[in-house]
Image (cartoon, rainbow, N blue to C red):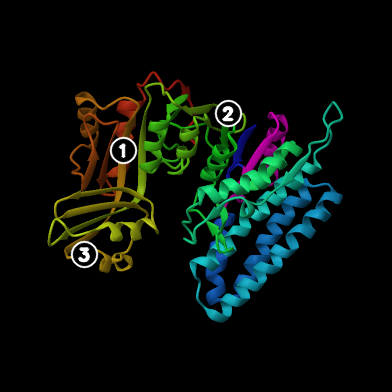
Amino acid sequence: MIVVKFGGAVLGGAHGLRQACNEIRLLPKPLLVVVSAFANVTNRLEALAELAVHDIAAARTALEALMEYHRAIACDVLRPDVLAGWEAQVAPHHRRLEEVIEGLAIVRDLSPRTLDLIVHFGERFSSSLVLAALNSMPQDGTGHALDAAGISALDLIITDSGHRFARPDIELTRARVLEHLVPALSEHDVVVTEGYIARSTTGQATTMGRESSDYSATLLAELLGARSVTIYMSVPGVLTADPAHFSGTRTLPRLSYRMANTLAELGAKVLHPRTVGPVERAGIPLVITCIGGTSTTIGAEGAGASSVVYLEDATLISAETATASASANAFVRAIAAEHPVVWTQRFRRRLQVLATGRIARASLPEHLLADAVWLDVQDVSVVSLVQETRLNGEDLSKFFEALGPHRPAAMQGGIEGPAISVALDRTAAPGAAATLHERLITSDAEAEQWVPHLR
């Protein structure tokens, strides 16, 4: 049994849905398929929720446009008899969304719990369309029609009540997997479920952080004892750098779990920070690929690869406490509950927290930082070099030469470790990252597969 996951960029309308279903048809069975919301749907639902608080008429219009987007895909892909069933299935979701936005217009307060309730429907629409499309496929040459069923992730993954960044209860989730998912996979060729969304122990819909669908797939694979996990994206594997920012990037054919984890922790968009942990614990290979493209296999051993991570938007929070023993744990945890933390460093009375995204000082939980005497917030970008092997003096020399005259605001890692990261002024970082990629990566013979610049 294998697990595959299709991201929103792959499920980009009717064409992407057909491509995904054709790929599913070719894969070994039984097969668990985990899907994200279609491209940009989660963003549209978040905007819809904000609109409902301030402009209910605009929110109603936005909801109808979103429903029409999904209906248009369904009409293009589904057989008429399957289309009618799909419309009946999603009608309750539509009505529930209408009820929630009307309620928001009255209370004028968008809580994390309500936002989770609204955005989780993106995955529900997506999974219903994928399942209906699979059931619309014709029989193959042997006369066999694909037998596909659906189980919502709300009935599989059980979490705490930490809305927007919920954490799964592994044992409760394991029990649901054994009760619902294992029998379904023994009875059907394909079972479709959702990533990103779950249900709390108190029964509400939760989400586990943006881009966490990959984590949903690897967690379920671990609990199922799957043979492998394949994640289909819009890029052909893990690359030497983000092709949205760099030209001449290349696919890294093989990475170790350790290097993949480091890339994710330092902000590489191709991997959610929690994705690798479950497959590493279970010893399951993880393949990152695009339909019809090259791939990266992540496993116990790598192939001496190197990669540059460029994190465009980040915030460096620096603080000083009155004493070296003052606790900063609650302060850091509160930041991490809202923004992924790239690193935290503490040396006596000085604290540095680097988090993704732009964070206003007014939103920081300063009351949780005991005995703070000074606090500063900087908008920065982060440039990191990650290798399978430990960095040596020559690597570090080339790294700092690439930075040129620009002085880092903060730094982590270095010699005897597999990675080094620096926080730089946002105007200086792009050039430094491009120079680093050119000098250290384009000469790397381990990265054999070139891909074109995608911008």
Residue labelled with disc 3: 370
Circle 2 residue: 293
Secondary structure of residue under mark 2: loop
Residue at the extreme top of the image, as rendered: 445
Range covered by the magenta-colored residues: 13-40
> How far from the left and from the top, in percent, is residue 4?
61, 37
User: Which of 34/404 is in front?
Assistant: 34
Where residue 41 sits, quadrant-wise, is: bottom right
Spot occupied by residue 59 in the image (x, y as percentages of width and height): 60, 71
On the picture, is 126 further left or further right than 367? Answer: right
Residue drawn at the location 45% of the way across and 36% of the way down: 243
> In the rendered structure, which disc, 3 or 1, sits on the residue that comes first in sequence?
3
The answer to whether residue 45 of the structure is visible from this angle is no
Amino acid type assigned to the residue bearing label 3 in the image: Ala
| Image vertical order of residue 284 relative to residue 80, above or below | above
Q: Residues within 10 Å of mark 1 (few under 14, many from 20)?
A: many
Nearer-N-terminus badge (2/3): 2
Which residue is pictured at 33% across the width and 67% down the height?
363
281 or 388, which lies in front? 281
Front-most of residues 189 and 24 = 189
Left or right: residue 1 compared with residue 81: left
Q: What is the number of the mark on residue 384? A: 1
